[in-house]
Image (cartoon, rainbow, N blue to C red):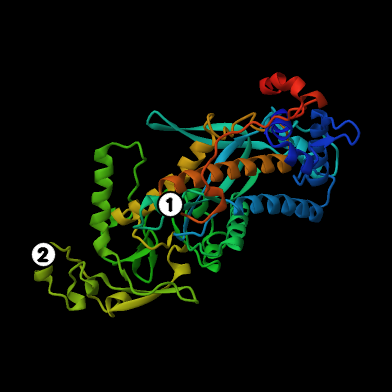
Amino acid sequence: MAIRQIHQTLTKEITLEIQLELGFATRSETSGEISYIPEGRFYYWSALLNEKLEFGEFSAWGVDAEERMRRRELIYQAIDSLIATTLIARRATSVALDATAIKAYSRSFSQAELTAARERIRNGHSAALPHDPDASYGVKTNTSGGSERHTVFFGYFCHALVRVPDKGQAPAIEPRLIESFSLVPADADCVEPSLDAIDRALHHDPGISEILVDREYSYRTPERWIYQLREREIRQVADLHENDQGFRHYQGIKVAAGVPHCPATPDHLGHIRRPSPFASAEEKANFRDQIEERRPYAFRRVTSVDQAGRIRWECPAQAGSVGCPLQGVDVSTAREIGLPVVNADTSEHRPKCCTQRTVTIDVADSQPKLTQEDYWGSRAWELSYARRTYIEGVFGIMKNQALESVEKGYVRKTGLAFVTLAVGIAFVSYNLRTLRKWASDHEPTIDHGLTAPDIGRTVFIEVALDRHDEPGDSSSESDSEAA
């Protein structure tokens, strides 16, 4: 996305016919000579784009909020239109959401100087800002050599949605296409830009019903995240944050990982820490053993969340996963088949869940942000959550130097509008290549204009013949053959 490379493409690598049509070349009416728009004109256009469409808080700090929002919508309308041409009818209803770091091309002040300068601008005073005024400091996670490390960088975060297969579907059911994205300064909150990307994706494709997210998103308060997804009729698959561990008590029921458990569930099973991807096989096996030890005490979901935000659950003894004398279950039979037997509360003050087959619990009272279809930590949940790795692979491809190479210097302009546009075009490029390869490997007969067979790279050259070299002029026949 460097200006010089853009100029090279539009004046040398497309047909003269298209250059003339788009105005990048002109033909003299008298001499017929071709002239091309100079490179300097492209720098002028890029500056004009910044002037007319910049919507960042600090790069366009003299522009009112309503106008900045209008400009932002124009940029994303253009990008979404381009992305939409690269999408095919979906065959799955799931997407993965994640963020990747986009480093700014320019250097910045120190964090303290940057904060002070921005504070002055917010108070209506002028102040010096970095060359890329909208970029900020953020922390990204690097994974290499079997460990994780966190690095501070200056730039942006790009929150993107990528298509993934539904549970049980073959991985190649459809290509890993990017549906939409939002680019924000690296220190910006993730919720609003992510919901905006989801809404824009739903606008052109309402078939999304499941989203896979990491703890950066699911840990947000229910009002800001999970309730917003529910309004859009989207369920989530999410991991637990460290602070979400432990039992929460509700009318005698022990709630863990968003699921109610028997009041007699052993206390040591409240906190089960999931090992990192780089943990030893022994640590991972120990985690699965603890999950399987706690799981029989979990209530069985009877209904989905209703309009009032309630779920009906069945006692685990009635569901046949534990033995309990209070529920009329034969304890000796339970022991014979290897089920845990609970030490039931026989007092008259025992919880309501111990006196009836099912209970109805308001999601708001039972860790609503953790509610999901599969039991957290189970094998089914692990297989489902593992689909998130597809989006991590997409980001790796995007930053591959042999492909889109979206790294520092990919775009050498600054400001939120121009960087957003450049990243969006990179995503379109990725989608084009991904769709074509997938169609070639899996669906060669798919009806989509962009999957037509590749005729190879062609260079177009306009050859100007003088009148002595025109066909039929015998005096220059050898010269014409040479030409």
In the displayed structure image, the side of residue 205 where residue 166 appears, left or right: left
Which image quadrant: the N terminus?
Answer: top right
Q: Is residue 65 above or below residue 101?
A: below
Marks 1 and 2, Cα distance to the nearest angstrom? 49 Å
Image coords of residue 310 (percent x, y): 44, 74
Callout 2 environment at 10 Å: few (<14), some (14 to 19), or many (20+)? few
Quadrant for residue 131, please give it. Answer: top right
Q: Residue furthest front?
A: 474
Q: Is residue 380 above or below residue 44?
A: below
Q: Secondary structure at mark 1?
A: loop
Q: Quick one: label 1 or label 2, which is nearer the N terminus?
A: 2
In the displayed structure image, the side of residue 447 where residue 271 appears, left or right: left
Residue type of the residue flagged with mark 2: Ile
In the displayed structure image, the side of residue 296 where residue 179 appears, left or right: right
Residue at 33%, 59% (x, y): give it: 375
Q: Which residue is mark 1?
A: 443
The mark lying in front, picked from 1 and 2, is: 1
Quadrant for residue 338, please give it. Answer: bottom left
Is there any visible trace of residue 201 in the rendered image? Answer: yes
In the displayed structure image, the side of residue 263 where residue 321 appears, left or right: left
Q: Which residue is mark 2?
A: 337
Residue at 50%, 45% (x, y): give it: 436
Q: Residue furthest right?
A: 30
Q: How many marks?
A: 2
Residue type of the residue flagged with mark 1: Glu
Callout 1 environment at 10 Å: few (<14), some (14 to 19), or many (20+)? some
Image coords of residue 341 (percent x, y): 17, 65
Image coords of residue 420 (percent x, y): 67, 43
90 or 438, which lies in front?
438
Q: Secondary structure at mark 2?
A: loop
